[in-house]
Every structure is written in C-alpha cells, then in structure tokens.
Image (cartoon, rainbow, N blue to C red):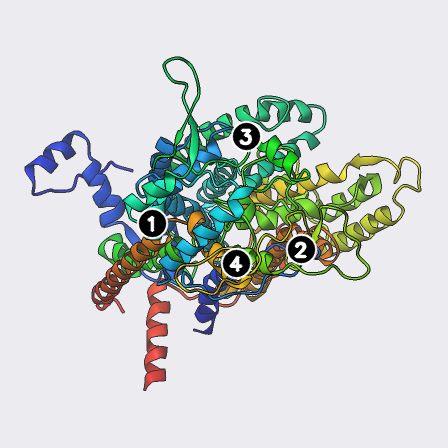
Amino acid sequence: MSGGEKAEFKSPVISWIDQRLPVFTMMQKEYGVFPTPKNFNYFWNFGAISMVLLILMIVTGIVLAMHYTPHADMAFNSVERIMRDVNWGWLLRYMHMNGASFFFIAVYIHIFRGMYYGSYKGPRELLWIFGVLIYLLMMATAFMGYTLPWSQMGGWAATVITNLFSAIPFFGEGLVELLWGGFAVDNPTLNRFFALHYLLPFVIVAVVFLHVWALHVTGSNNPLGVDPKGKQDTLPFHPYYTVKDTFGLGVFLLLYVAVTFFLPNIFAHPDHFVEYDSLVTPVHIVPEWYFLPFYAVLRAITFDINLVMLGGFGIMFLPFFLCLGNCCAGKILPFKFPKLPQSSVCLLLGAAVFAVGLMLSGSIPLLTDTTIIEAKLGGVIAMFGAVMVLFFLPWLDGHPVKSARYRPLYKTFLLLLVVTLLALGWVGSQPPEGLPVLVGQAGTAYYFAFFVIILPWLSKNEKALALPKSISEAVLKEKNENAGVVA
Amino acid sequence: MFEMKQMRLVPVLLLSLLVFGIYTPAQAAGGEEAPEQHWSFDGIFGTYDRAALQRGYKVYSQVCAACHSMDRISYRNLTALGYTEAQAKAVAANYMVEDGPNDEGDMVERTALLSDHFPNPYANKNAAAYANNGAMPPDMSLLVKARHGGADYIYGIMTGYEEPPADHELLPGQNWNRYMPGNVIAMAQPLSDGLVSYEDGSSETVAQYARDVAHFLTWASEPHMEERKRTGIKAFLFLLAFTGLMYVIKRKVWAKVH
C-alpha cells in the first residue's frame, strides 16, 4: 500500500515518524488523495458503514465479555446480571444484540450493490472472494454469539446446527462430537463457542484488511461499471467521500439507534428469555432473521435423492460444470471441453429426468430404490452450496458489461432473486408444512437456477444497452437532462 | 432517473419488512392471541405508572408469590417502584431467608435485607413441579419478555379463564383459558374480585388486578426501560443534529462538482 514518493508534512513530529514508518504517507495516499470515481450513489456507503459496525461489535463485545460467564449453569444469569446490575450493561447488550442485525443489514445491502453493479467482475474477483469469506465468517460468528446467552433458543439453535454436520457420511458423527466436546450440547460446547466467538471477529478484521487492500489495488467500481479514464472521472477520497460516507453513516445509525433504544427486542424471539433446558424442546426453533433464507433452503430438500434424480441434477448443472472446467482448460487441464450445450435444453431435460426419478421413487431396482443422498444430507449440501456458489459468481457471470443499468435482463432476474430471498425468509420463519414447503422448494430452485443456469446463459446471450464513453460524459449528460427538465 | 428511485426502495423495503415484523413466527394451535391493551409504558416517551407498580407488587406478593419465584429481583429494587429505602427495608423485614453457614457451620434463618433476592416459595425445581401436578410455575422475573404478547399476554391469561367448550372434557388439575396456547392451563384461576385490598381507592376487580400485575411484571422484565428511552431520545436527537450538519457540509463540499 505504501511506497513510491513520500508526502510532505508540516509537523516535524509527523515527518519524523513518517520517514521511519510511512503510515501518514499511506493514509494520505489511500484515504486522502485516493482517486475515487465521482459518480458513486448512496449504495457505496455500505462498505464504510459495515466497517463502523464491525468496530462497534468488537468494542461492545469486549466489554460484555468482561461481565459474561461462559458456563452452562451461569451464562444465562450472567447475561441477566448485565441487563440489570452492570452499569450501562443493558445498553452494551442491546447495542451488541441489535448491532449484529444492523451489521447484517449493511452487509446484505453491500452484497446487493456488488451484484447489481457487477463489482465482482474482473479485475475485482479476489476482492469479491474476500468479501464472501467475510460473510461466511460473520455467519459463523453470529451463530455462535446467538448461543452464548444459553437460552432455550440459543441452546436449541446450537443443537440443530451442530447436528447438521452428522449428515456428512463416514465422519459426520465424530465431527459433531468434536464440535460438542462431548455427547450432547453442554458446557464444553458453550466454552468453545465462546472462545471462537471472541476469536473470529479478529479474523474478520484481518480479511477486511485484505478486502480493503485488494480494493485499493483495483480501485472502486461505480454505478456505470465503466472504468475511470482519467482525472476528470475521479475525485480525491477526502473530503468528497469522507463527508458523504459520514452523512450516510449518520442516517443508518439513526435507524440503528431507533431500534436499539425503542424496540430493542424486535428481532428477539421470546424463547431467547427462557434459560436453556436440554429436556424441553421449544415448539419452533428459528434462527435469527438473517439466516432465515438459508434455513428455508436447508428444509426445502424433503425427499431422498436416488440415482435418477442425481442424474437429473447433473444434467441441469452441466453448463455450470463445463463453464468451471473451461476456466481451467488450457492452463491446468491439457484439453478443452466441448462447447457449452444449450443451457435451456439442459435445464428442461435435467428437470424432466429429476421429476421422473422423484415420481418413480422406490420402484425401479438400483435406479430409483436406492437412496444416494438422504434428505437431511441433501438439505445440508443445498444450504452450504447456497453460500459456496457465491464464491464462483465472477466466473458464472462472464458478461462483459458490469452494471445492471445496461443489462435489463440481468436486472430483472436479480430483482427477482431479491424477491425470492425475501420469500425464502418468510418460509424459514414458518413451521415446515403446507404452502411454505412448496414456496421454499420453488425459491431454492430459483436461487440455484439464477447462479448456475441463468447467469451463464445471460453471459452468452444478453444484449447490453449502449455504454457511455466515460463517467464524466455520463455525469454531464445527466446534469444537462436535469437542467432541461427544470427549464 | 427512474431506476435510481427504484433502487433506493430496496433497503427501505428490507428494513420496513424487518421492523414491522413480517417474520413473526406462527402461534401454537389453540388459544387466541391476547388483545392489545394500552399501557403507560407504550411508545418512546412511555413510563411506568408508580401507583400501578406498587399495586401490582401487592398482587404479586399476596397471590402469585405463593407459587411463582422471582429470583432476579431483590428488595433494593423496590425503590424503583416509588418506595423509599426505609419502606423497602420494612418490606424485606417481613420475610425470612436462609443464610450461612455461620462460624459453627450451621445454616441460619434471618430476616431479609435490601440485598436479598425475593425468596423462592419452593426448595428447588422438583419440589415446585411436585407440588403443582408436574407443571412447574415459571419464574416471573423475565416472564413478560419470555412470552409472545408480553404484558397483553399476562393480562389475557389473568382475565381469560372460562368454561371449556361442551365437547371438551378437562382432566382433574386442568383449566380452560381463552388466551393460553393450546387453551389448557394447569394454574387454577388465581384472581377473584376483592381478593387483594387496595389503599388508593382503585377498583378491587380481577381486571384491575390483572392490569396492575402485568404492569409490575413488565417492570421486572425490563427495569431500565425508562432510562433506556430517555437515553435513546438524547442519542437520537444528537445524531439527528450531527447528520443534518453532515448533510449541509456534504452539499457544500460537493457544490463545486455537481
């Protein structure tokens, strides 16, 4: 990040330090004069907002840890003690509890912005991958934090989620015992979850550092998806974006403060205020809202998968596998795969084979009466697959145009994906019976189809609108149009 | 820029979905949702009504406390209900608690101090369950937060006892309550008109007792609510001014660019 010429500083103290360790030069270069596209909209605030919330979570978390007792018999009481007797303890706890929700809100908007404007496309693939890694770490951290108050909801969430790993063939059971530190969710589980909940945020900080580093190498994308062509297209980061980020942060924090102080338990289920009892199962075990869509995907696979169904899946995802394979072709692999077959043909054919397999389930020896993947394992694969597929996004979408502004088809499918995720969130909050199951299955099908079928297909076939020549040209044009409207 | 307007709706939509609780989990079958009541602690300026808290404490200590523990509350907390420290001490002096072991190794009984938590009516969970047909009376310190509907639910349960439908036969030790999830509740109707005498002239009816005890239990679940809301208003106003200032500065800085 540092390197090149040194900046000049008036203060002798600063210059003395800077000559020995050029942190001030670095800050000047990366956050002072750093050339930033001049056309950001407010979606570009959410990186900075997420950063502030990460720091807020770490600070409140460290102080909470000073008062919290990670023991199965005392954890719940120690949290109540924080709420009642520790000075400003209720504030710390509510800030931390709701901070997690708002951190996820900020990060979800940040991810959506990246997808809408194609920020994951070359040369920013690694930047995107670091981002997905941060999201994955956040999920692990948030889940373990959810269990720490050792409430009915927390303890049972730990039971449900750790039990997922038992679906893994051969070593699943052993893995679950390793996670538990015993033969059931108990004190050793709580201890290791607390240790990891304290550790992972600092791993997140490290990956955020890499994420920001990668960003400062490639530079930011922008709403047009057209790279800056020169000075006329950019502005120095300070003061233009420091002040814009601070304003956006203020608006976001107003919402956060409103919820934290006036509706602090809006995201909390009543079973979060009952101490964990391993003998009493709650009526509904639900995760926090930010996991609900994935919970819906997990529960969408209600059927065992036989050989024919697996074949159907294989045909549906063939374009995806070939697309991935061809990324390696010529470099790692000594040959190239044949040209992609028509995705739509694969989709229809695969779906038909899958449906036949499902209907004939259990009737044809070997082909449909042997369970290859049990429903539980299928659900686990689907849920983890739903996150893992994000890592491959830069290669699934190979369309040369970045911004959805110039890709009407992509824009429609992406907004449909947002609607699907909201629907899946609703499904995740409902008992798994009746309509929610069907909506969950349709939503899961669309989620995967979006990534592995629609995106590769659009990459080949979508005709983009005409791109502006440069950022400044587009900005001037917009300004003139607005002036025209006024006149 | 139609598209931009569209896009701005997305975060607003997401937030409003969350804030307005679209994701409320379904209720258990049987048992209506308790109707919403108006409380003095509703809203961002809401506060507890000290007189209601004191009446509610009276109902709790004379009726509920026979079976329900409240072990996160201590006598010193009674000053939050508007009692003076001397009054709270006098209340504590009515109760005996076990202390010790003393220097000779014996457990001793002594009168309760301000620092003592409300004593548990049963020796342990098993004793509580055994004495109540297997249904342990839950601790009341967090009950309002631990139930869907909160104070409305408590009020609903207290006033929702009725005869079971003709086709439903209750087993011994079961009661029918309109607002209990599943309708069947082990606790017999605890309140009756005139059961607790009030000194401030409030009506001595089941409805009034239920309101007061729900008020008291809300305080017990969330004792710092008033401080929280006061702090929240200050924090919100400060941030509003700060954000407004940032908006003005942002406009000024960007004026040359646009």
Q: Nearer the viewer, mark 3 or mark 1?
A: 3
Chain bearing tag 1 is B
Q: Is residue A72 left or right of residue A68?
A: right
User: Which residue is pictured at 39% across the width and 12% down the height?
Assistant: B104
Whether labels 4 and 3 share one chain: yes
Distance from the alpha carbon under mark 2 to that under mark 1: 51 Å
Disc 4 and disc 1 on one polypeptide chain: yes
Indicate the secondary structure of the residue bearing disc 2.
Answer: helix
Give the numbered dot on residue B80. Answer: 1
Badge 2 and badge 1 both on one subunit: no
Measured Cα–Cα span from mark 2 to mark 3: 52 Å
Few, some or many C-alpha atoms within 10 Å of disc 3 (few <14, some 14-19, many ≥20)? few
Q: Nearer the viewer, mark 2 or mark 3?
A: 3
Residue A468 position by quadrant = bottom left
Q: Which residue is mark 4?
A: B210
Quarter assignment of residue A54: top left
The residues bearing labels 4 and 1 have C-alpha atoms spaced at a distance of 20 Å
Crowd around label 2: few <14 · some 14–19 · many ≥20 (10 Å): many
**Could you tell me which residue is drawn at 29 percent across and 38 percent down?**
A1
- Give the chain of mark 2: A
Q: Position of residue B37 (x, y in %)?
A: 51, 65
| Residues at marks 4 and 3, CA–CA distance in whole angstroms | 27 Å
Foreground: A146 or B106? B106
The numbered mark at residue A443 is 2
Identify the amino acid type marked 4: Ala
Instruction: Name the amino acid type tagged 3.
Output: Ala
Left or right: residue A322 versus residue A244 is: right
On the same chain, marks 3 and 1? The answer is yes
